[in-house]
Structure formats: structure tokens, C-alpha cells
Amino acid sequence: MPPEPSPSRPSPLQAEHEAAGASFVDFAGWSMPVRFDSDLAEHRAVREAAGLFDLSHMAQLTLAGPAAAEAADRALVSRVQDLEAGRAKYSLLLADDGGVLDDVVVYRLADDEVLVIANAANHDVVVRSVRERVEGLDVIVTDQDDRALVAVQGPRAAQVLAETPGLEVDDLGSLGYYRITAGSFGATPVLLARTGYTGEDGFEISIRASEAPALWRALRDAGEPLGLVAAGLAARDTLRLEAGMPLYGHELGTSIRPPQAALARVVAASSTAPGAEAARSPLGPDERRLVGLVGEGRRAPRAGYAVFPDESATDPIGEITSGALSPTLGHPIAMAYVDPASAASDTTLYVDLRGSRLPVTVVSLPFYRRKKD
């Protein structure tokens, strides 16, 4: 008999989600809410008001000690030593050949402390790789497995936080994008970052797991009069797709080098981290490029669908990595890796949708940009 599958790990917020009637899915070994009510309603709430997300499956890793920033630079391809305390960077953990092991957000908490947020699916790879790469430095690497992560995303996110009882952040009004600050919820310390994965303004709050349910309820109760709703993984995926943000396992992976995904800018020119030199190499003539695609009608390309140069071609020139009918824009959108000759903007290509060819047009990413005040 085959072994019984391991049960999914529950989020610290599992009981809250069950009480709200969420539907669950196994995601990277975690039982996570895929939706609470309607994917479309949750997506629209984030674009128009605010959404409340459970991100507790994400890995939280701290590097502490005199060599914390140097250690981060040994592991990641960005220059954390150049960051001021309170600032953050999007970065990459690469294999020796330049393939992407994970994409992360790294925060300079203090001169001697760095926080790395990594994808749940790559938790073990990130923890192991970072520890191996920083051996010999005066730094302690800690897997913060006892912490939860909650996000509020949308144009009213800052208002929701400001009106949440017990949540104290001294400089919330002046906290800039890709910055992080310390605060408290009641007597519990929190870290609050102005970052996110939806294309909207928003915040991510790291808190001790045992206190996460109380924070979730406080945010929900404060936000509901402002239009906030709890949102699941399905809405998060369509939101990030509209914003042109890559998802590991779709747009990123060990077979993809950063320049293919238009992420060459992430690799610091001075980085000596594993994979950095390979990642700085120019794109080869046969390396596919990531592009955006838009279509018409209501049928959307999905991950794995083949892309062709014309209606009758038999040899594909690319493959869809993510696709959906955009709730905000009202037409099909997708990201795909295609051959260099087919990657120019305004090129017409065709996606095979179960035997029929859907015409699509190559466009620059992102598909959607939020309106800024």
C-alpha cells in the first residue's frame, strides 16, 4: 500500500478561517484558504477598498549579529550592506548556474539584523542554503517558525491599520513603500512592512503566532466598515498576475535565469553570491524571454498551454506560465516564456486552447498599475 499523505499543516489562523466558512487547499504543505466567498468579490475588494490575507505559510528567517548584512550578501544577489535600517529589497537566491532557487524580500531591521521572507514551497531550500553560505561569519541564522504573517492590501489599507484598536505604529503615516518599522499589538511586538503582492498599497505584519488570531479579528472588525474582506489564495493569484509579479514555480524556477524574467536589475553588479556571475551573463540567442500577453473574449490561457507564431504552426515557440480572465480589465491576460524572435511588443501570437487558436498580443508588463494619490 502507498504511504498515507502527510496532513497539511494548519495556519495559526485556521480556526478563524473555518469560522468564516473558507474553502481550503493544500499549498506547499499548508492548509490555506483558497477563498472565503467569491474570488471575484475578494479581488475587487482589494482593488477598491482592502483585503485581509493570511500569509503565515511564508518562511521568516532572521540573520542576527555583527556580520548580518554581510551574511545576507553572501547568500543573496542584492546589496543588503547598502541598505539603511528600515528599508527592504526584492532579491533572489540563486544556484551556481544562475537558476532561481527562490525570490525573497529582504529587510534591514538594524545594523546587526536582517529579515528574509521566502516562499513556503522553498522554505527548506532557503534555510539550508543561507546557513551553508554564511558559515564562518559572526551571525546567527534563525528560522522564525513560531511567527505568523498577516497582510492588509488595498487603497484603504493604511486607514484600516490606523483604526485598528491596539495596533500601535509610531510612524505609520510616514512609512514609505518597501520600508519596515517596529510596532506593537497590545503588549505584543510586531514588525510592519509597507510591502505586498497585489499591485496595491498595503502592509504585511509579522507577529508571534499565538497572537495572530486576535490581530486578525481586530483588523477584520476595524476594516469591515471600510469595505475590507478576507481574501484567499485565488484572489491573491489574479491580483499578482494583473500586477505582473512572478510566482515561483510558474515564472521562476531553477531552469530560469534572472534576465529571462526581466530581473537582471535585481543582481547587484558587485555581488559575489553564488549564481550572481552567471546571472549577469547576457541572454543567449535561444533563451526564452518572459512577456505579457493580452487577448479578447472570455476564454483565458492557462499555465502549460502552448504558444505558436501563427494559426497553422505545429511547433510551439513558447508556453504560458500563468493566465486568467482579468477581473479588473475584463479580458484575458497571461505571462509566457517565448522565443526571442517572438518577444517584441505588439507581436501577434496564438495560444492553443484545447484545439482552437486564440490570438494574443505581446505587451509590456505589468497589465495593471494602481492609481496613486
Image (spheres, helix red, strand yellow):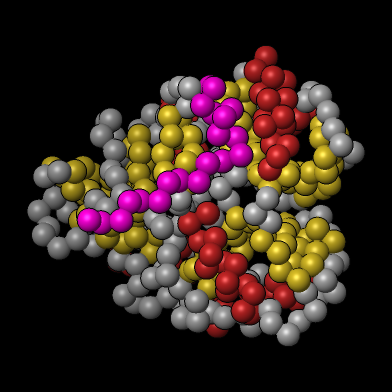
Residue at the front extreme? 1
Q: Name which residue lies at 60% across and 55% down.
A: 59
- Give left or right: position of 148 versus 65: left
Nearer to me, 230 or 313: 230
Q: Name which residue lies at 41% across and 58% down.
A: 249
Magenta region, main secondary structure = loop
- Give left or right: position of 217 versus 238: right
- Res 62 quadrant in image: bottom right
Nearer to me, 295 or 39: 39
Q: Name which residue lies at 77% across and 74% down.
A: 139
Does the magenta run of residues contain 333? Answer: no
Magenta span: 1-20
- Res 15 quadrant in image: top right
- Give left or right: position of 183 versus 311: right
Q: Where does the image place residue 356, in percent across and percent down from the top left?
A: 13, 42
| Quadrant (top left/top right/bottom left/bottom right) for the N terminus | bottom left
